[in-house]
């Protein structure tokens, strides 16, 4: 299973193995990672799983579709490397992925 590193706003790291085919959001929820609320359960409808993808990994996480781009635009701290964790599917190519959480999801 790919190892994903989730970094809280305060710098605390959580390294967890996430099954192939799961979303980065589901990996956080399944492992009780603080900082990803996932209010809509992964339906790309709330932006409470907003993460900053480490720039070295952006090319491997796929391209956000129009719905994700729209939802990310509602995040008050959106940046060029912002993604919704529910929209990043875990593949073998994401082994070692690093994502950072914003200070707040709301």
Image (cartoon, rainbow, N blue to C red):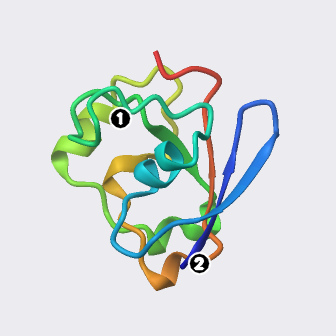
User: Callout 2 environment at 10 Å: few (<14), some (14 to 19), or many (20+)?
Assistant: some
Please report the residue visible at 35 percent of the width from the left and 35 percent of the height from the top. Answer: 72
Residue farthest toward the right in the current orientation of the protein: 11
Q: CA distance from mark 2 to mark 1?
A: 24 Å
Foreground label between 2 and 1: 2
Q: Which residue is mark 1?
A: 72
Q: Which mark is residue 95?
A: 2
Question: Residue 21: where, in percent of width, then height?
Answer: 33, 72
User: Callout 1 environment at 10 Å: few (<14), some (14 to 19), or many (20+)?
Assistant: many
Question: Residue 104: where, in percent of width, then height?
Answer: 57, 20
Dot 1 lies on which element? helix
Please report the residue visible at 48 percent of the width from the left and 84 percent of the height from the top. Answer: 92
Work out whether residue 81 can be spotted: no
Q: Earlier in the sequence, mark 2 or mark 1?
A: 1
Residue farthest toward the top in the current orientation of the protein: 106
Q: Nearer the viewer, residue 101 or 2?
A: 2
Question: Residue 1: where, in percent of width, then height?
Answer: 54, 79
Q: Nearer the viewer, residue 39 or 60?
A: 39
Is 96 situated left or right of 48 in this image? right
Is 73 situated left or right of 13 in this image? left
Is 37 situated left or right of 56 in this image? left
């Amino acid at each position: 299973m790919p190892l994903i590193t989730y970094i809280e706003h305060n710098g605390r790291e959580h390294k967890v193995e996430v099954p192939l085919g799961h979303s980065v959001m589901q990996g956080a929820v399944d492992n009780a990672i603080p900082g990803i609320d996932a209010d809509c359960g992964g339906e790309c409808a709330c932006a409470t799983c907003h993460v900053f993808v480490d720039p070295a990994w952006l090319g491997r996480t796929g391209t956000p579709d129009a719905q994700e781009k729209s939802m990310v635009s509602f995040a008050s701290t959106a940046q060029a490397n912002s993604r919704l964790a529910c929209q990043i599917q875990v593949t073998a190519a994401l082994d070692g992925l690093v994502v950072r959480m914003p200070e707040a999801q709301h």
